[in-house]
Image: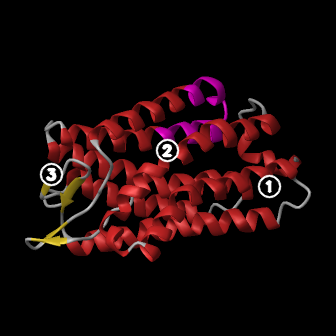
Amino acid sequence: MIRELLKDNKKEKVLFCFSPEIMLFTFISEFILAIYTIVKYRKTAFGRAVALTLIMLGIFQLSEYQICAGTNSLLWSRIGLFAITLLPVLGIYLISILNKNTYFVKIGYVIALAFGSYFLFMPKAVNDAVCGGNYVIISGQEGLYGFWGYYYFGFLLLALWEAMEGIKKSAKKKVMKQILFWFIIGYLSFILPLTLVYIFVADSRNGVASIMCGFAIFFAFILALKIAPLYHKIHGSSKNDLLWWSSN
């Protein structure tokens, strides 16, 4: 799901993913998980945020599928970029509900909305979008995408750090430790394969973002079927779940 920078005919290449059939399957799976989460956990802020994360993951895959189908590729490129731009800060927001640290959430939303607005509305944000069969290539302004990459990877690593810090501070809160542990597993399910391929398989480095996109579906299943149920087990359906840590 993270963009990869390549140069071809002086264009910046981003957003490599698996075949259109896999994109469609992933989209359907993530939207089914989102609907399931909304039905079961919509009464809590945490549950709604999980559902929104799943929807953004699904929109990204739908956008890539539409690009490969030849349906208004520039518009769907903008939509896909906007959707995945929100994902890192949504992860930080979910973890902040657990560990009470909202500082990075506020900064993250400002950055994410700034990038997202640019991708949606600025004429030069996306220059071209081409389906390569196994992946989609989107070209845009190189400098901006570089900063976007720092934001994206930075907030992924920040989420991992916040989760680990939360575990250290939750020695007597068994279920919260379990939730944060599964967050770490979820993040590593798509970050670790990318890292291993990049280090050990030099010929595959140009496709590292494809691996990231494919493995993100595991994080979606972990969110919906492991993290959300564990949270609901402790907090139930209270609408004041943003304060649940104070009493558990």
Residue lying furthest top: 39
Task: Name the side, left or right, on which 124 lies relative to 214.
Answer: left
Q: Which of marks 1 and 2 is in front?
A: 2
Q: Residue 217 carries which label?
A: 2
Residue drawn 72% across the image and 35% down it: 229
Residue 240 visible, this angle: no
Residue type at the position of mark 1: Lys
Q: Which mark is residue 130?
A: 3
**SS at mark 3 in the image:** strand
Which contiguous range is marked in magenta?
A: 36-54
Q: How crowded is mark 1: few (under 14 residues within 10 Å), some or many (20 or more)?
A: many
Query: Circle 1 is placed at which residue position?
Result: 177
Residue drawn 16% across the image and 52% down it: 129
> At which x and y percent is residue 214?
42, 49
Residue drawn 81% across the image and 67% down it: 168
Residue 53: within the magenta? yes
